[in-house]
Image (cartoon, rainbow, N blue to C red):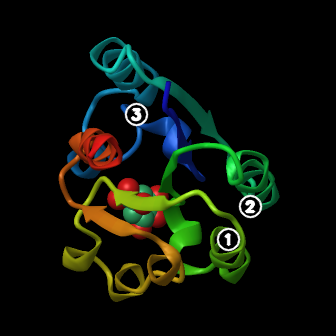
């Protein structure tokens, strides 16, 4: 059974409540249940943290055994050399996901420290981006 982790960073615990015009009105917990039933042949797990260190610890924890990590690091995408280094240091492939089209927003969202170390990037497809990332790991 393939092991895939969805790892969400800061403020993504507020999905469904936060800036609904940008991020939609569904909570991630409810979306994750949909993913779990759709992909019941996968070992799909979910972790969210608002702390950079906890995100790095999780990447280290699964990054030598899991088949894939789907990472939305939220605003740390645009600031964190430490998360970029964590991705570079593991064996598991990481796909970077953003719910919104970050290239259509403020200029500070248009640079990612993480992309260079990721297998691919999915941006601007709403929550469906996580499903697209799963599909890419099934290939
Ligand atoms: C985000 C985009 C980031 O710029 C922002 O800080 C987020 C969410 C997205 O999924 O669109 O928190 O990663």
Confirm or deny contact between disc 1 and disc 2 (CB under 8 A): yes
Crowding at dot 1, Cα within 10 Å, few <14 / some 14-19 / many 20+, comes out as: many
Residue beneath label 1, please?
A: 83
The residue at 69%/65% (across/down) is 90
Give the vertical position of 55 relative to 115 (above or below): above
Q: Circle 2 sits in a helix, a strand or a loop, which is it?
A: helix
Dot 1 or dot 2: first in sequence order is 2
Q: Please tell me the numbered disc located at residue 52.
A: 2
Residue beneath label 3, please?
A: 17
Crowding at dot 2, Cα within 10 Å, few <14 / some 14-19 / many 20+, comes out as: some
Q: Circle 1 sits in a helix, a strand or a loop, which is it?
A: helix
Q: Quadrant of ligand 1?
A: bottom left
Q: Mark 1 to mark 3: distance in Å?
A: 26 Å
Dot 1 or dot 3: first in sequence order is 3
Give the vertical position of 45 relative to 98 (above or below): above
Q: Looking at this view, is 70 or 136 the one in front? A: 136
Dot 2 or dot 3: first in sequence order is 3
Q: Position of residue 69 (x, y in %)?
A: 52, 50
Badge 2 residue CB within 8 Å of ligand 1: no
The residue at 53%/83% (across/down) is 113
Q: Mark 1 to mark 2: distance in Å?
A: 8 Å
User: Residue 106 lies in what quarter of the image?
Assistant: bottom left
The residue at 64%/76% (across/down) is 88
Q: Position of residue 116 (x, y in %)?
A: 47, 84
């Amino acid at each position: 059974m393939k092991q895939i982790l969805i790892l969400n960073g800061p403020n993504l615990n507020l999905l469904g409540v936060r800036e609904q015009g940008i991020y939609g009105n569904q909570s991630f917990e409810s979306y994750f249940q949909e993913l779990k039933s759709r992909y019941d042949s996968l070992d799909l797990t979910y972790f969210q943290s608002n702390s950079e260190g906890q995100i790095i610890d999780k990447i280290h924890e699964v990054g030598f055994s899991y088949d894939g990590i789907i990472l939305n690091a939220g605003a740390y995408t645009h600031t964190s050399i430490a998360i970029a280094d964590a991705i570079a240091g593991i064996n598991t492939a990481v796909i970077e996901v953003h719910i919104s089209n970050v290239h259509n927003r403020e200029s500070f969202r248009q640079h990612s420290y993480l992309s260079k170390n990721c297998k691919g990037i999915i941006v601007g497809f709403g929550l469906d981006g996580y499903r697209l990332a799963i599909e890419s790991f099934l290939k």
